[in-house]
């Protein structure tokens, strides 16, 4: 899975949790989940759980704490997929 496919899949996971549709439509690697997409911390946990299920990976608490933007999320997912 290349980075563009991974971001597209991540975007689908994020969609139900964001209220800022303009930021969602213009999502890039620099998009911040909290500041740009208005996703609260409880929903961030739900997103991480959805990512674990969608990509069949386990994300530990340390990684979860750093997963605040698209770029970091992609890097963590890529690392987890490479470890499988």
Image (cartoon, rainbow, N blue to C red):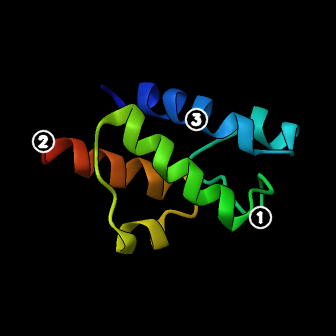
Q: Does 53 sit left or right of 39 as displayed? A: left
Residue 3 in view here: no
Instruction: Work out whether mark 2 precedes mark 3 in sequence or the reverse, and give the earlier one.
Output: 3
Quarter holding residue 34: bottom right
**Label number found at residue 67:** none
How would you rate the neighbour count of disc 1 (Cα within 10 Å): few for under 14, some for 14-19, many for 20 or more? Answer: few
**Label number found at residue 13:** 3
The residue indicated by pointer 2 is 84
Instruction: Work out whether mark 1 precedes mark 2 in sequence or the reverse, and give the earlier one.
Output: 1
Residue 74 image offset from top left, x and y in percent? 42, 47
| 3 or 1: mark nearer the eye | 3
Give me the residue at 53% from left, 27% from top.
8
Across the whole image, how many numbered discs are drawn on residues? Answer: 3
- The correct choice, above or below, for 23 with respect to 69 in the image is above
Residue 59 image offset from top left, x and y in percent? 34, 58
Task: Measure the alpha-carbon separation of dots 3 and 1.
Answer: 18 Å
Residue 75 in view here: yes
Identify the secondary structure beneath mark 1. Answer: loop
Give the quarter of the figure containing the C terminus: top left
The residue indicated by pointer 1 is 35
Instruction: Work out whether mark 3 precedes mark 1 in sequence or the reverse, and give the earlier one.
Output: 3
């Amino acid at each position: 899975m290349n980075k563009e496919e991974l971001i597209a899949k991540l975007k689908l996971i994020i969609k139900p949790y964001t209220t800022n549709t303009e930021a969602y439509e213009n999502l890039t690697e620099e998009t911040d989940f909290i500041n740009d997409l208005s996703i609260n911390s409880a929903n961030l946990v739900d997103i991480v759980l959805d990512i674990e299920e969608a990509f069949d990976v386990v994300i530990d608490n340390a990684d979860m704490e750093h997963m605040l933007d698209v770029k970091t999320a992609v890097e963590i997912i890529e690392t987890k997929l490479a470890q499988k």
